[in-house]
Image: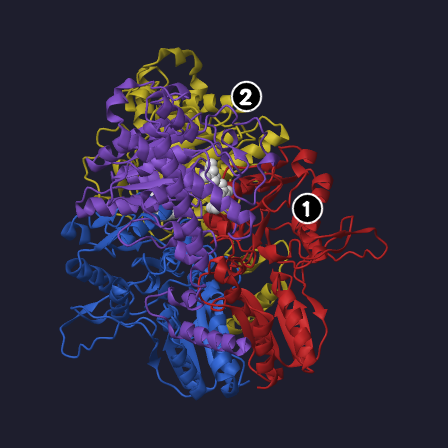
Chain colours: A yellow, B purple, C red, D blue
Amino acid sequence: MELDYPIKKIIDDKGFFIDSTYEKQINEKLVKEFYFNMMRIRTFDRKAINLQRQGRLGTYAPFEGQEASQVGSALALGSNDWIFPTYRDHGATLTYGADMVRAFLYWNGRVEGCVPPEGKKIFPPAVPIATQLPHAAGAAWAEKRKGTQNAAIAYFGDGATSEGDFHEGLNFASVFKVPVVFFNQNNGYAISLPIEKQMNSATIAQKSVAYDMPGIRIDGNDCFVVYFETKKAFDYARSGNGPTLIEAVTWRTGAHTTADDPSKYRSNEQGMNIVDPLSRLEMFMKNYGYWDEQWINEVNKKITNEIESAVDEMERFPAPNVDDIFDHVYAEMPAHLAEQKKTYLTHLRGTAK
Amino acid sequence: MELDYPIKKIIDDKGFFIDSTYEKQINEKLVKEFYFNMMRIRTFDRKAINLQRQGRLGTYAPFEGQEASQVGSALALGSNDWIFPTYRDHGATLTYGADMVRAFLYWNGRVEGCVPPEGKKIFPPAVPIATQLPHAAGAAWAEKRKGTQNAAIAYFGDGATSEGDFHEGLNFASVFKVPVVFFNQNNGYAISLPIEKQMNSATIAQKSVAYDMPGIRIDGNDCFVVYFETKKAFDYARSGNGPTLIEAVTWRTGAHTTADDPSKYRSNEQGMNIVDPLSRLEMFMKNYGYWDEQWINEVNKKITNEIESAVDEMERFPAPNVDDIFDHVYAEMPAHLAEQKKTYLTHLRGTAK
Amino acid sequence: MTTHLKESNHKNEMTEQMTMIQAINDGMRIMLEEDDRTIILGEDIGKNGGVFRATEGLQEKFGDDRVVDTPLSEAGIIGTSIGLAVNGFRPVVEIQFLGFIYPAYEQIMTHVSRIRTRSMSHFTVPMVIRAPYGAGIRAPEIHSDSTEILFTHMPGIKVVCPSSPYDAKGLLIAAMEDPDPVLVLETMRNYRSKREDVPVGKYTVEIGKGKIVREGADVTLIAWGAMVTIAEKAAEQAAQQGISCEIIDLRTLYPIDRDILSQSVQKTTRAVIIHEAHNTGGLGNDIISIINDTSFLYLRAPVERVTGFDVPVPFFSLEEHYLPTPARVLEGIEKVVHF
Amino acid sequence: MTTHLKESNHKNEMTEQMTMIQAINDGMRIMLEEDDRTIILGEDIGKNGGVFRATEGLQEKFGDDRVVDTPLSEAGIIGTSIGLAVNGFRPVVEIQFLGFIYPAYEQIMTHVSRIRTRSMSHFTVPMVIRAPYGAGIRAPEIHSDSTEILFTHMPGIKVVCPSSPYDAKGLLIAAMEDPDPVLVLETMRNYRSKREDVPVGKYTVEIGKGKIVREGADVTLIAWGAMVTIAEKAAEQAAQQGISCEIIDLRTLYPIDRDILSQSVQKTTRAVIIHEAHNTGGLGNDIISIINDTSFLYLRAPVERVTGFDVPVPFFSLEEHYLPTPARVLEGIEKVVHF
Ligand SMILES: Cc1ncc(C[n+]2csc(CCOP(=O)(O)OP(=O)(O)O)c2C)c(N)n1
Ligand SMILES: Cc1ncc(C[n+]2csc(CCOP(=O)(O)OP(=O)(O)O)c2C)c(N)n1
Ligand SMILES: [Mg+2]
Ligand SMILES: [Mg+2]
């Protein structure tokens, strides 16, 4: 099946156009937008790892290596679309408009980290694998029923394809022809399990055949192909044609999480042949005259400032509020829970003095 | 995709060979075996419906119309293979060697109906849809690990393909290359839901692509093609090649169960164009000189006798034993359960007097 | 109790004789008419009107995009309904039998019940899950579970369990108007077992409130669903012995009406709990704990439980031996009275 | 109790200092050596040795067909393990965290626990499911559930929950030798919290037996898993007030050791139950019912429960407020003593 699903690319590993039909659609503004967002989330990611090492953040799931997939896809969304991320997709949600302070808070075990800015339809990260796929199908279905042109995107990994919810989500989406894009980041591993042991199929894209929906396989480290193919899938969805499955082939450069030691299950050489998506964009920019040192320096400074001040704000964020664990279980608190809350708060005041 | 998965047939609707390469492999013995078994389970099925109408049996799930699928596939098994049926597959299990008295008992709410004859690897019918697929994969995996040549078959319906367990079962089977045949009876409906609303894919066979396993689509009312294709899948499995997905396209002539009224959701004309598998076999037998009135009469008499005496035995079967509800929960009964049993049996004796 | 739905007053309203299944159907019809965010989903609920006919006629009337036949996929149904609910709709899902809710358990446990908490009330899931449950109708295996506690140990959802046509409609409408997810357990044995006067208009029965269905002085019987009838029969027999039973139909299983329990038990000083779920881990334990917490000093005898046994619900030829009977309840009553 | 496994006697045996995670690893190693029907399955348990290193080194030693990395598919793992179990193998499954067992709930509820009953013991499922559980290790959402009651209300399986290295190995081996399915809940907080002498050879701890871990006269504290340590700390503090606590480590959650509970409570006349699961529907209720049934006349005060609240386990920045603390337990102790 691999032959039926060749990996689509727009630029090659050295940053040269393969498919020149896109030359016209790629302008400076877009290139800079890619660069800015990819550099921004890379910096965020590395900062988060550092903070975790210093004990200033809890266990963290890095996405280095997947920036082209996350930025390319997120930039393809319209501002009223829905986004259903996993724990590893803060790159996508930040690009789409999530609040960076809250992204940090999330990794500090703060529920505030799940609350999106008003008007941004960003769902809390799905922790149980693949469960968000039916959610995305449902939210997209709602848009269709409302008669809007909005769509939804669900992010998920290669490992997620083994869960029943992957299958049930895609089946529903295809049966009800809802405007949703299933965006798979095939980063080669699900924790320690390589994709060859996750599935017998040569590609993830071919799983679309089970639902007679379009399936495409793209180079997830080529931000341009990610962007244009995701956009196509959204157009297709908005035109009432239903869902698409996109397999973005990428690579998780780092550990599964900061609690994981990848040397236990993969050798150092693995992934060496994969060109980092940011370097690839940099080469592209140099190849085609988009590289502007001054702008780069400005952008990097801007990013550093943003991140430093987000960390700062995160650390000055009001301490967690015990009330919160009781206050958001129901719209109205049942009597027995109110009693539990009262008793506990009294207890806390008692032990505090 | 429908074009990629043409429905294979050996004989046509009028009982003439389409694929004459099989002429040599089909001899009198085999033809008579088909006829006998299909007529036997048809008679069983109709008897069961009658008994249900008379209040002598509980709700029953008829399989009329699916006899070629069930008999053709069951006859392809070896005597040490495993069979994982649903509630609608008593035709297959009876053909494979299940006890008819117990098949009746099953429909009378008797747990004895789930106990296979010693040495027959017939699993109790799966009631929760699609859950038996992973079981079959696991039992097949065990055979592979033991180094035997045995395989397993899982029966399931078109509706079952929508459940996560369908997907997870096929994925496991393909990843571990276990000797299992996934035998789908696409009978057009899952209770009231036609297959077009169950899935967006034109065929069930194409779902095999998701697992890079062979998928074939056959005429489930042509007992010959069912038999030979299932045999092929078993040979493939026994040779260490792993699983196959077979879609046998058939038709449920009657109601979903005796509690169901199909006129609510399908018209009388639907299915009219489908030639009954037994009539088709009869035509074939007449076309090619296998029809032997005397033998037919004998066989029908034999079947009637068998069924009458099975009904008789079922009705004379010892009354259900209350102890059984307590005795088979654990190998050794925990103390609290022993106490519950004792108290209840004492209570029963008390109220009996 | 704290839910915002108030029991309506219908003294002068038109009523009609309805069975429980008709009352449920009527409740959905009213809400489909009144609130176009309402959408009904499930297996065989459209043309077929549901295997119990709860949705009969609704697809015809409201169209197949509001009364939707879904694929055979419980996790898919609940999962997509979550998406519908957070995006403005009010899905009412039929799970064909409670025993087939298990494939959706992850979606309910990790999402339906937690999305409000997880998002600090930014996203909410106003969803109703209806599920026929319980034994006693000679159904095949797995069709007869009463595993309500899998949902009462799940903060974030509510669980109701009407036993009468009136309560069924009122609680269903209350559930459909509730801002939070509600599981409605419908005892199949009562679907057609009796008719009663049910208002034809809209009304609600407050979630979180039990009901005294028989007043008495000596023992409190606590039951819900099909067990209310069993309790009533036992109370009749006990009356012949001069024992006066009060019966509470719990109606809501989460959050439990602690006041009605403690008031009644403090009055009668004895209690017998009847449920068809297994004894171990059953909701009866919660009720004993509530009595322990609220009424310890009033109790004259240990609370008795008459329940299903700690065995899988048997195949139907033996299910009568699994289920509580009036005779077993009577024994329980005698035990607490003669302690 | 009625299980056939007897606690071994190892007075003269070689021991080694082990953490709980090492003891668990050792238990699996021994059974992999001894019984070639043993097969270990799970996510990341092979090369990676499990996310907690419970299976470290086992794949290297026994090969990847006996220690099998599976796809990310809990229903698939449990479902195929059923097939392996009914066909002669003895699968030991690791579910990465208890909060990820829910997708397999249908397989466990309708098959693992019922295949023996359904087939009148013709087919059996000698399967062990290991699952790390509980809060307090600053893990992400859903990683901290303690939903043991979803499995104690499920006739056909047993549930054990060791709190110490010794018990962990002994109960695990007992589970692996049990003819029926056993869920082994492993409290993550204790994985590496202490070392103790553990026999290097094979031994079992009988399923269904609690253990008195501290003798006392005034109050019985009942706990399991990580809560045993909390109970011990509270008991220390109570001792300073002159209150003498007896502590029961329940160890097996199904079937519960009723004798140890009733004997202790009848002696102390007061009880406090500590568990981290939600209060409503928690196992504490079962224990109250057992005390109600067996020791009603002995009790001097209502049984107290100190438990997790009826809220989803919070994100980790607030999890300390969810979990029982020695201070809260102490309050419970004071309450029953001064009732
Ligand atoms: C239902 C469930 N099972 C197990 C886990 C534990 N777990 C967290 S991430 C992960 C691997 C996911 O792999 P993949 O889908 O490829 O995504 P990636 O982490 O590579 O982005 C696992 C097994 C989980 N979160 N949910
Ligand atoms: C998990 C689950 N959900 C729902 C049901 C109720 N149910 C029983 S049979 C059936 C339809 C099955 O259709 P299909 O798989 O096509 O098999 P068929 O009955 O046509 O043989 C349904 C929905 C069930 N048994 N299990
Ligand atoms: Mg991955
Ligand atoms: Mg069907």
Q: Which residue lies under the disc numbered 2?
A: A239
On the rendered structure, is A201 left or right of C269?
Answer: left
Coordinates of residue D259 in the picture (x, y in percent): 39, 80
Q: Where A67 sits versus C324, above or below?
A: above
> Do the residues under discs 1 and 2 have CB atoms within 8 angstroms?
no
Numbered tag placed on residue C25 in the rendering = 1
Q: Nearer the viewer, mark 1 or mark 2?
A: 1
Q: Residue furthest front?
A: B294
- Choose between B273 and C326: the one closer to the eye: B273
Q: Is residue D306 left or right of residue B141?
A: right
Is residue B229 visible in the rendered image? The answer is yes
Please determine if labels 1 and 2 lie on a single subunit: no
Q: Is residue D78 left or right of residue C86?
A: left
Amino acid of disc 2: Ser
Q: Is residue A41 visible?
A: no
Q: Secondary structure at mark 1?
A: helix
* Disc 2 chain ID: A
Which of the labelled discs sits on residue A134, or is there none? none
Query: At 49% across and 29% down in the image, what residue appears?
Result: A174
Residue D31 horizontal side relative to residue A177, left or right: left
Observer-nearest of B146 and B149: B149
Nearer-the-camera pick, D66 or D338: D66
Secondary structure beneath label 2? loop
Q: Is residue B83 above or below residue A221?
A: below
Give the distance between the C-alpha atoms of the residues marked 1 and 2, in whole angstroms.
Answer: 36 Å
For badge 1, the amino acid type reads: Asn
Q: Position of residue D124 (x, y in %)?
A: 31, 58
